[in-house]
Image (spheres, helix red, strand yellow):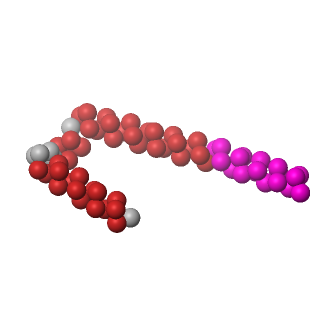
Amino acid sequence: MLKLLFWLFVLFLALSYFGISIQSIVNSPAGQQNLAYLAYLVITGVHWLLNHVPGYIQQLGTASSTAA
C-alpha cells in the first residue's frame, strides 16, 4: 500500500514538473468521454462478475461434493 502511495506521489510530482494539470484533463470533453467509458467498463465488469461468479462457485461446490 505504501508503494502505491509513493508511486502516486511521484506521478503527481512528475505531472507538476511538466506543467500538466489533472483538472484540465478531467474537465476537457475528451477527458469526460474517457472517464465515462472507463466507468462503463467497470460497471459492465462488475455486472458480469455478479452474474457469473456465483454459478462457477456453485459448480465447484457440486464438483467437490461428488468427488468425495
Furthest residue to the front?
3
Q: Quadrant of residue 31?
A: top left
Q: Is residue 53 magenta?
A: yes
Compared to 55, does 13 lie above or below?
below
Give percent across and percent down for residue 52.
65, 43
3 lies above or below 30: below
Q: Is residue 19 left or right of residue 53?
A: left
Residue displayed at 24% across by 59% down:
9
Q: Is residue 54 left or right of residue 14?
A: right
Q: Is residue 5 visible?
A: yes
For the point 28% across and 56% down, the residue is: 8
Q: Position of residue 19 (x, y in %)?
A: 10, 46
The quarter in which the N terminus is drawn is bottom left
Q: Is residue 23 visible?
A: no
Name the foreground residue: 14 vs 36: 14
Numbered disc total: 0
Main SS type for the magenta part? helix
Residue 43 in the image, given as x and y percentages of width and height: 48, 44
Does 31 appear above or below 23? above
Q: Position of residue 18 (x, y in %)?
A: 11, 45
As drawn, the residue found furthest toward the bottom would be 2
- Which residues are the magenta region? 51-68
